[in-house]
Amino acid sequence: MCWEVSAGNRSELMDLSVIISVSSMQHHIAACLRSITRCPCDTIDMECVVVNDKSTDEIAAIVNRYIERDSRIKLVTREGDESFDARNMGIEKASGRYILFLDARDRLCEDAWEQIEAAVVEEYADFVAFSYITARENGKLKAQMLPISDVISTDVKVARRLMYAGAAFDTYWGKLFKSSIIRDNNILFQTDLPGSDSLLFVAEYFEHCDSYLMTKAMILYHAPNAESAMRNYSMEERVEFVRALYEINLDMVKHYNDSELIGHMQVYYVKVLTELFYAYVKEYSYSKRALETIYEKALENVYLKRILEEVDERMIPSGIRKYEYRLLRRGNAAKLRKYFSIKAMVQKG
């Protein structure tokens, strides 16, 4: 061990803790662990903490076989409060200066450890974000490049815009987190807003950082779970979730005293709302009236109206986005349904 539990403080920190939360993913965990064991022992002091989130399959047996081959891998089982996220248990057990979170479906790229080693050993920044590759179920790969002008950026304004006015930082994968910042500020994964646990964790962590590094270097393949966390919630509930996230982010952004950043954030949430309305076209393509009824109820939400009213339309960059914004502002469910239905047909064709 690299820290003394009895003293309550870590006497010596290793470089990196990789945390994997696993729940019924026995067909993926082996490939994930193989990519982790490629970490060079002579240059990075690494541990891998696998949190078994009460899986009912052969996860424990598979992980234990890898533990026999590589003592850097550790297996713990989540116990106790069901609302306590398994990744929080991983944080409790981790003893690295930096933390890298992975899903069981992820695997690190061949040259990932070279990129990680440089960031960890040199301690580039409090917040380190890499690009990554999305691996779809149909086998196609897509590079998710960070939208920065150069290969590497340390620009604070760019970092804040990517955090609060876009989706580039709304996930925990592909990032390095300093364990001291997490623990000193008691940052945990929350379960209050479904589907937003990752975004809230990253946003809260980001708020306590003083230095940032963003790079187009890609370190992992990420295979998103096809099961949407939002599937069991109504349109009205989803609008409420968006409203809650909007208010949380707006409170954070106001601390920077940057009116331009606030404006960009508000425009981004127009995009979020637009995509939320558009998503329902596929689900309710069988009934025009059912879709319009859902739209009507959502458009009655006073908070949705307030978000739209606060937007400076002049900051919306494209004509299409401006048109969609005006449709939402006018609140005509029939016109919204017709527009998004046509848009779906065009994109499909």
Image (cartoon, helix red, strand yellow):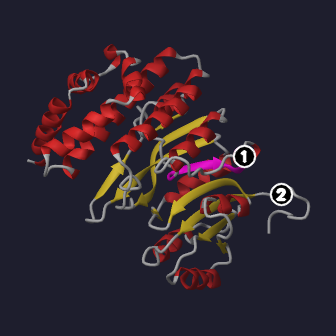
Spot occupied by residue 50 in the image (x, y as percentages of width and height):
61, 70
**Mark 1 / mark 2, whichever is N-terminal:** 2
Q: Which residue is drawn at 61% across and 59% down?
A: 83
- Expressed as whole percent of the image width and height from the top left, the position of residue 259 reads 50, 15
Query: Residue most toward the left?
Result: 349
Q: Residue 186 carries which label?
A: 1
**Does residue 104 sit above or below 173 in this rendering?**
below
Pick the front one: 234 or 15 = 234
Residues rendered magenta in the picture: 173-181
- Let me know if residue 180 is in the magenta part: yes
Q: Residues within 10 Å of mark 2 (few under 14, many from 20)?
A: some
Horizontal side, residue 291 vs residue 260: left or right: left
Answer left or right for 73 relative to 238: right
Label 1 Cα crowd, 10 Å radius (few <14 / some 14-19 / many 20+): few
The kind of secondary structure element at disc 1 is loop
- For the residue labelled by badge 2, is the local secondary structure a helix, a strand or a loop? loop
Count the marks.
2
Say which amino acid is labelled 2. Answer: Arg
In the rendered image, residue 136, in percent from the top left (x then y), is placed at 31, 61
Relative to the observer, which residue lies in front, 176 or 349?
A: 349
Q: Which mark is residue 10?
A: 2
| Location of residue 115 in the rendering, given as x and y in whole percent from the top left corner | 54, 53
Q: Residue at x 45, y 61 (%)?
A: 109
Using the image, determine if residue 107 lies above or below residue 204: below
Label at residue 143: none
Q: Is residue 202 left or right of residue 10?
A: left
The answer, for residue 15, to whether it is visible in the render is yes
Judge from the rendering whether residue 292 lies leftward or rightward of residue 15; answer left or right. Answer: left
- In depth, the one of 52 and 303 nearer the eye is 303
Residues at marks 1 and 2, CA–CA distance in whole angstroms: 16 Å
Instruction: Give the residue at x 15% y 42%.
Output: 289
